Amino acid sequence: MRCTTTIIIGAGQAGLAMSRHLAALSVEHVILERGQVANSWRKERWDSLRLLTPNWQSRLPGFAYTGSDPDGYRTMPETIDFLSDYATSFNAPVECETEVLSVSPHVDGYIVKTSEGDWRCRSVVLASGACNIANVPHAAEAMPKGVTSVTPMQYRNPAMLEEGGVLVVGGSATGVQLASEIQRAGRQVTLATGEHIRTPRSYRGKDIKWWMDVTGALDLGIDDVDDVTRVRHVPSMQLIGSPAHETISLNSLQAEGVTVAGRLMGFANAAAQFSGSLANVCALADLKMNRLLQAIDEWIAIKHMEVDVEASYRLMPTRVPETPLLNLDLADANIKTVIWATGYRPDYSWLDVPVLDGRGRLQHQGGVVDAPGLYAMGLPFMRRRKSTLIDGVGDDAHDLSAHLMNFLDGAAAKAA
């Protein structure tokens, strides 16, 4: 059995950022990775996907983008190279092709069993990501025979889908991107959407992420919100990172020919059933978008930046059908595939520590898990709004590495 002070599980941006900070603090540690560095980016993303954040926003501890296209959006191969170069830059102690089988408490820390042998350590950082398992609702169990279920983790491109129409369930970033790509490939797409977050790609001449960065919106912390559980489940923004810097929305999808329906409620007699509240959820999305743009306008006025940016404007309201689509016979519509763009969840099936609630969610306070020496990284709104972003994991790693160091010092003092 090998020993170290801290084990980090996962060599994505969160695990690497934590490693960089622990190295600076001279904390002995190792990163255990089931595949290669940036494994999820390598194996669980579709071919055309680009980051939703501009290249300049790829900032990690001691490392940043230095290319010639700061306002572009990195492809998956470019993202993999970026993270691999980051690991190399500080000789991150990564043990690749090492699957974690279990993590269990030990008298003075934890035992981590892996496919390549066991480890004993004083502390563990769970940086395996928030998107290990695709959420597929129970409604899928009643889906008509002859229709194929696909998750975004399985989807690669339209050519892999069976001939025929496609129902995409979910109107957040993933759902709208896949709906657009598949429709442009010549398939008829129906998109079922409930609550969603509409936003322009750019506003007043700047990327929307630029505005959220400079105004401090991405730095919003868990102490700044009334209900942190609610904000951790807010849908992702309807954004796409494309060379054309295009805005994607229900309006742009309908212009491409996508049929838009309300939230999928279930299946009955081979027909999909949708909520009739599409107009209401679209009106709410428009309202929230305009509040964001108004907040940006007010910040510009306070900073006296009016002469430096374009004039204020508002987007056209979301168009909704006069008669909402409530039922769709999948056979009549020749729909052969349903893509469940309904979110993801972490996989903690290997975690033999009593820190999960009744719904299988990790119990933590800003990444400090409810067990001595156990930490988490990379979860939605873990400490800040930007906690899942490449640009956000560095600040979280700074805070949690300091907490971990204090924990180790306290444990050493007790043992002395």
Image (cartoon, rainbow, N blue to C red):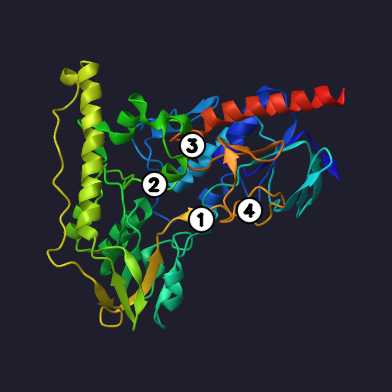
Classify 10 Å Cα crowding around label 1: few (below 14), some (14-19), many (20 and above).
some
Going from the N terminus, do you reach mark 4 or mark 3 first? Answer: 4
- Element assignment for label 1: loop
User: Which label belongs to residue 234?
Assistant: 2
Q: Which mark is residue 348?
A: 4
- Name the residue that disc number 3 marks: 387
- On the question of residue 185 being in view, the answer is no
Q: Secondary structure at mark 4?
A: loop
Please tell me which residue is depicted at 64% across the width and 32% down the height of the picture. 19
Residue 281 visible in the current orientation? yes
Q: Choose between 266 and 310: the one closer to the eye.
A: 266
| Residue type (three-letter) at the residue carrying disc 1 | Glu
Q: For the C terminus, give its image quadrant.
A: top right
Q: Secondary structure at mark 3?
A: loop
Residue type beneath disc 4: Tyr
Residue 28 horizontal side relative to residue 67, left or right? right
* Horizontal side of residue 120 vs 369, given as left or right: right
**Which amino acid type corresponds to the residue marked 3 in the rendered image?**
Ser
Q: Is residue 63 shown above or below 113?
A: above
Type of the residue with mark 2: Val
- Camera-nearest label, 2 or 1: 2
